[in-house]
Image: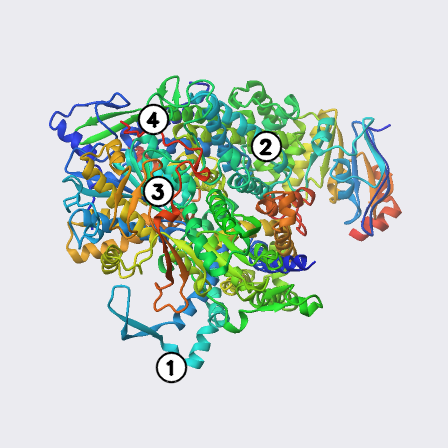
Amino acid sequence: MGILEVKNVNKRFGGLQALGDVNLSVAENSCHAIIGPNGAGKSTLLNVLVGKLIPDTGSVMFDGQSVLGRKPFEINQMGISRVFQTPEIFGDLSVLENMMIPIFAKRDGSFRMHAIESSAQEKEIIEKAEAMLEDLNMADKRHFHSASMSRGDKRRLEIGMCLAQNPRLLLLDEPTAGMARADTNNTIDLLKQIKDERDITIAIIEHDMHVVFSLAERITVLAQGTPLVEDTPEKIKGHPKVREAYLGEAA
Amino acid sequence: MFGLDKKDTTLLIIVAALTLAAPFLLNPFPTDSAMAQFNAGYPDLMQRFVIFGIFAIGFNILFGLTGYLSFGHAAFLGVGSYSAVWMFKLLSMNVLPAILLSVVVAGVFALLIGFVSLRRSGIYFSILTLAFAQMSFNLAYSVLTPITNGETGLQLTLDDPRVLGSSSTADGSIPVTNLFGAEMRATYEMVVGPWNFQFNTGYYLSAILMLLSFYLAIRIFRSPFGMMLRAVKSNQTRMNYTGLNSRPYTLAAFVISGMYAGLAGGLMASMDPLAGAERMQWTASGEVVLMTILGGAGTLIGPVLGAGFIKYFENIFSKINEGILHSWFSFMPDGLEDTLIALVYPFIGKGWHLTLGILFMLVVIFLPGGLVEGGQRIGRLFRRKKSGQETDKSTQSTPAE
Amino acid sequence: MDAIILQILNGLDKGSAYALIALGLTLIFGTLGVVNFAHGALFMIGAFCAVTLSKIFNLSYEVIDESQTDFLGNPLKVKTPYVESWFGPELGGAIIDWAVPLAILFSIPIMIAIGFIMERGLIKHFYKRPHADQILVTFGLAIVLQEIIKYFYGANPIPTPAPEALTGSFDFGAFLGFQANAVIYPYWRLVYFAFAAVIIGGVFAFLQFTTFGMVVRAGMADRETVGLLGINIDRRFTIMFGIAAAVAGLAGVMYAPINSPNYHMGMDFLVLSFVVVVVGGMGSLPGAVLAGFLLGILESFASMNEIKSIFPGIDQIIIYLVAIIILLTRPRGLMGRKGVMED
Amino acid sequence: MSKSNLTRRGLLKTSAVAGAGIALPTIFTASSAAAYTNEPTGSSVTLGFNVPQTGPYADEGADELRAYELAVEHLNGGGDGGMMNTFSSKALDGSGIMGKKVEFVTGDTQTKSDAARASAKSMIEKDGAIMITGGSSSGVAIAVQGLCQEAGVIFMAGLTHSNDTTGKDKKANGFRHFFNAYMSGAALAPVLEKLYGSDRKAYHLTADYTWGWTQEESIVASTEALGWETVNTVKTPLAATDFSSYIAPVLNSGADVLVLNHYGGNMVNSLTNAVQFGLREKQVNGKNFEIVVPLYSRLMAKGAGENVKGIHGSTNWHWSLQDDASKAFVKSFGEKYGFPPSQAAHTVYCQTLLYADACQRAGTFNPCGVAEALEGFEFDGLGNGKTLYRAEDHQCFKDVLVVRGKENPTSEFDLLEVVEVTPAAQVTYEPDHPMFAGGNLGTCNPGA
């Protein structure tokens, strides 16, 4: 029994079968990649997992509880954090403030105000945020205006913001898309480090095989909305069906 | 001090000093000089400055922090005024219960409207708030006349059934608003040489409440709550995927700013016990939007500056008439005098709207951050000069080493 | 029944004005992403184009008539328009009479020029600025335009009648086979409706069938992508602004005989047309037109006595009430696209 | 042109402490030394002219302002003296008021009660105005009247037609020269009967706010007294610009008279729309369909153009009147500005003279003294014939004009012709008439 169980999920958009009978099980503390050609339904699947889309049929269970029908913020509170294809950070805020918000959210739940208390007095929160930035090697950038940072730094910050909440499942949506090689490698290193140091389950949707094969322990190949195969990276590499459907096309 | 950091404390102290010394500062010209026209230090206008300051500070808590642009905030001000006048009519001429009631009623009203309107964002939210406010205005002007006295506005009369206090004074006039006996309209005049300064009880009450509101706004800006509101403005998606529901935050901000508007409305009624329906019209809502943007949305002091700027124009420029122009330029040769007057005339008196429109455009074109940015630029200019001198010194000292 | 037909006609007529203004607003939103609070002022300027042309035609020379006196008891100066003395009273009179329709030709170059100047001189610099700044600057511009008109024409409304031949009413009752005179409707209002339909149709056809229109539609769908194609979209957008200004202006020209123009008529329509645009859905041209007619008709029905007696004051709030209901049930208006103006 | 020096009060105080340079505090409360608010102690007196300078009534405001400037000129002995020469009271002699030169300040009411009060307050608090006058709507008049009562200055109302101004909202410090809705009804009714008979069915369209309601009530009452039937009364929103959906139901309602209880832009549009829908040419119940606009304003009627022709209404005064006073006023106004004055200009000119005269006769600027001099004052020679300022409600009682849109105007000003001058007696009512009941004049307040 995995921490995330997707059973018989179907989703149609008009005439298009976006997801057809998807079954997926992600084991706890593993790194599971979902790959597939463009239009294979990866993003649809991800949106189902985070509550943005509701499937026509099927169930999605996280740690024994259904995620269907819950709002994104409720799903996050269950312990699922999401990293977006384009980094979603609080661009108007400083790096440190970006890091404080998830820590506040974790401590206070959805709504507690402290409307009068100054955020500068929240010693404990600041310490935690600074420690996290230290871990990310971003401590020197704490007062940067976050929107003006490089894409790699934004990604790093976003991942850090997710980690600051100690999620049980981290969902990554093409985390290195549009990044320079050096930034990509940095991100891979960061994710490896996270995988090694924390008890965390990672589900990653990716296009870049280099990233997938450096990180994943198991890989599901999605084609036309349906899982084709699921196996270890080594086996996937040599799988004829995969070569045909995906890698062949890529070559 | 007061739980603020040094910079904010300085700002608060400066604002407090300026506000309390306003009767002096706004009357810089001797009363019989030609420039006296530009004096703004009389009770009614000073009251308006601080009351609209409160309104704009509150509006900025919503718009400046969360980015939600409400086009219906005047409705809360109007509701506040009506509540206060009804309090005067039914309960007592003491302004305290009236102001309290107006804040509470405006808060409740804001809660209802905000709960519905905040289901949408962006311009859809703006139009929803506009629609609610226009409905309130249209109904207050016509169908709800028994409550609002429609076109004329809700006024006190000689036969109000006041529970605490009398319907009319001994000499047959309507009692005046007061705070435990201190009449709001009481004015102490101080004549120093050619100057005449007016100190009005109502102004000081409003000023103190404005300072409290300003202080509260600083606290909110600097609080975790304020940070959450800025996060809402910055990125709602990330907000949701960080386990935060943005609705309670935006609703809280909406209600707080609605209560600020209610406070402003209650104070307006306390200074002058009349509540007119046009206080709720979209133009009035638009005015506070303009004040905030003009001063600098999202800054602490900007809205207050914007409010002062617009009210100054409305009250001072509209009163300059041709006769005054003649008295200003009378020292010139006749031909030149007439030409100058012909040139200036379209911009003053009945043309004050034109001047205001041009100024809106100039400010927003050249000072994208509003008046506050203008101030910052001037500040930077001075600082650059200073730091320039310092660099000079250091370059001079280098060769000596 | 005839009462309902009449109100539908009234609704279509009001809707025509709403739809034309909303159409122009949406063109500007959709192509340029600019909130144009000066759009009502453009409508007003259009109406004043009609006023101006009729004033030009009425430019007169004065002849002193000793037999009559003016209000001070001096001999009366009788005015004769130059147009009449040049072309004779017959033709001259007809020219004056047809001033409003002629103003259509007069207004198009003026409105397009105003549109170009506005876009190049002002709006261009505000594409990347926040919507709040756009609102402030265009609102300032609206006040300035309004005050300029007020300076020259005064604050009172100025009568600008339709041509004599079009002032009567059309008997719909007889036409539809009801009792005669049961449903009569003024010719000019029918003309206005037909005119609006032609303009709306023209704009749609232009966007649908010309290359220019195709590029603009692509630009409305995704500004960045079209930019990448290397098409000079900015110049096309300038032209689009000119067209939007012309549509607003024409709506104003033809509106002049319905209600005498005054300098603040633009502001009266501004708020309403924003509501129309949003109800239709931001960035949707068909939505704007649909919402314009829908709200026009609903407003007309709400002013019927039968309905007012059930809901007192309903005609005061109907537009806003409908806007609230539609926005709450359809998050992006009737035909809005996702992601337009939601930040 | 008056070169007004605004802040006399400061000047005088200054001279009192000249050279000393020390503070001399005075507290403005009931116990203060001054006898009344803004007591003029120098060589001049300041009046506050509070008129709409922006917004839809700006043109009326501008005309009022012209008349005020003319009045001030005449009071100070300039010009040809205008109606001062024809005024029955000869107290004024062209040397200002009680020897003090008249100066003035102006403000913008924006036709909003809030803005009007703000601007009136500014004139009282900052400029030391002893009297406030002007305005172009009843809402503003009532709001400013209330303020003047509280502040302790006299308010001389400008254009305000609602019964409430001297009815339920009357104030001891407020005075109205203009006529009111009741008088419109009383004056119009006999003329309407003569023209259209006593068997008529009327349909009312009424602006949905206080003034509209009082006018509707008045006209309904006076026409029903003739035997007319009221088919329907429909309220129209103030913000309405297109009245087509209100006019359309009139067509088949069985009514044969349409009464438009609208003013300003509303009136222009509703009348234009009514004519567009062919109501003028319609035959109902075998009679010609008629339209009545109970309150006419020439400035506004101009906006409706051809549509006013042959339409009846009432007005306070019209420049074509041939009495000496009217002729004198038209002459001095027309020579100064090049066009004839409007009724708004006339009423505010009269108000200014009446105030000045009352001060002169009372020998004081004290509002209580002035009010006493105005109460029950009978005069003539201001263009409306014999007039009484009634003590009970501070309303002027004078002849009312019934006018009609002129068929063949000779100039752009020649829009209306006087059909009948209804004598004052016919429009007079008891102070406790139900339409005016519920108010209380209170006592005069000298402030200070």
Q: Which residue is mark 3?
A: B313
Towards the viewer: C195 or D274? D274
Q: Which residue is mark 4?
A: B185
Of mark 2 and mark 4, the one earlier in the sequence is 4
The type of residue carrying mark 4 is: Arg
Q: What mark, if any, has residue B250 been given in the picture? A: 2
Q: Chain of mark 4?
A: B
Helix, strand or loop at mark 4:
loop
The type of residue carrying mark 2 is: Thr
Q: Chain of mark 1?
A: C
Of mark 3 and mark 4, the one earlier in the sequence is 4
**Is there one chain holding both mark 1 and mark 4?**
no
A233 sits left or right of C65 in the view: right
Label 2 to label 4: alpha-carbon separation: 38 Å
Whether residue B131 is situated above or below residue B182 in the rendered picture: below
State the image coordinates of residue B310 (x, y, percent, origin top left): 38, 41
Counting the numbered discs, the total is 4
Whether residue C201 is situated above or below residue D28 in the rendered picture: below
Quadrant, the C terminus of chain B: top left
Towards the viewer: C174 or B213? C174
Q: Which residue is mark 1?
A: C86
Label 3 to label 2: alpha-carbon separation: 33 Å
